[in-house]
Image (spheres, grey):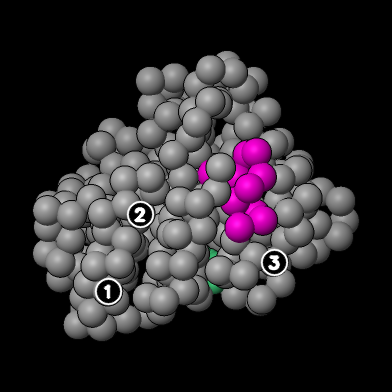
Amino acid sequence: MIRKKVIAGNWKMNKTAADGVTLTNDIVEAVGRDPSVDIVLCPPYTALESVGRALEGQSVKLGAQNMHPEKNGAYTGEVSAEMLRALFVTHVILGHSERRLYFGETDAFINKKVLASLANQLKPIFCVGESLAERESGSTLAVVQRQVEGGLLGVTKEQITTVIIAYEPVWAIGTGKVATTEQAQEVHAYIRDLLTKLYGAPLAQKVRILYGGSMKPANAPELLAQKDIDGGLIGGAALEAKSFIELVRAAAAAK
Ligand code: 13P
């Protein structure tokens, strides 16, 4: 079963609209026509429209970093699926550990967002991952199971293959401490087993599971060669055209 690799850049709270367009143009020029990798750029809300314009007619996709589950209403500071769709956004990162940690997002709230994104034809990049304390206490798989099952509650067989899952061990995010390929592959395989139990093997084999956490051009080839690692959700290395382009090329070269 061949799953097309995905390289998604999570710019987090970085880049003005103008800087984002420059970065986007450099990426599109270098790898925008590579049909072997799905590329997704996730700028902050304030750069979505400008980056979206720079991506017009290109195959590189536009993603948001978050979304509120409600359609509209009194939710100061929030943005809905419909608003994102109007900017030609196709993907949305949901349940990122920084949202869970700093903004108190729970599995139940993230689940509402996943369902709302799917109902609005947005592809969720649904993030899971354990903290350092959880890994050290041996509860990694239990935590990931709770997050996967909680986040996907009510997602149907028809919908599951449009979900992209990102495994991001919290202790590896922005720390330069990448998970070993064995650590990453173990959790990815476990997530695929969970999906197999929930949706059956044929569908589980189609779901892309990305690794995130200090992925860089130097460590990407080994990670991307693992059986159940289908791409990367990139933070720091997505902020420079050179490193992001190298990551796309590493994904294109991975078998
Ligand atoms: P870094 O690549 O900076 O570790 O960030 C990973 C991440 O959180 C992507 O969502």
Find out whether residue 59 is within the magenta segment: no
Which residue is the site of mark 1?
A: 26
Task: Judge depth for marks 2 and 1 and give the one in front.
Answer: 1
Q: Is residue 44 left or right of residue 223?
A: left
Residue 192 screen position, x and y as percent: 63, 32
Magenta segment, prevailing SS (helix, strand or loop): loop
| Residue in the image at 22% along x and 72% along y | 25
Disc 3 residue type (three-letter): Val
* Residue interval drawn in magenta: 221-230
Q: For residue 185, which numbered disc appears in the image?
A: none
Q: Circle 3 sits in a helix, a strand or a loop, which is it?
A: loop
Residue at 72% across / 61% down in the picture?
Answer: 179
Whether residue 120 sits left or right of residue 189 in the image: it is: left
Crowding around mark 2 (Cα neighbors within 10 Å: few <14, some 14 to 19, many 20+) is many
Q: Secondary structure at mark 2?
A: strand
Judge whether 250 appears above or below 141 on screen.
below
Residue 196: where, in percent of width, then height?
Answer: 62, 22
Quadrant of residue 116 in the image?
A: top left
User: Residue 39 shows which numbered tag?
Assistant: 2
Q: Amino acid at mark 1?
A: Asp
Viewer-nearest residue: 240 or 19? 240
Q: Is residue 103 visible?
A: no
Label 1 Cα neighbours within 10 Å, binned few <14 / some 14-19 / many ≥20: some
The circle on residue 178 is: 3
48 or 143, which is in the foreground?
A: 48
Q: Earlier in the sequence, mark 3 or mark 1?
A: 1
Task: Determine the CA span between mark 3 and mark 1.
Answer: 27 Å
Do tag 3 and tag 1 residues touch (Cβ < 8 Å)?
no
Where residue 101 appears, as percent x and y from the top left, is 58, 65
| Some atom of ligand 1 lies within 8 Å of the CB belonging to the residue at label 3 | no
Viewer-nearest residue: 45 or 247: 247
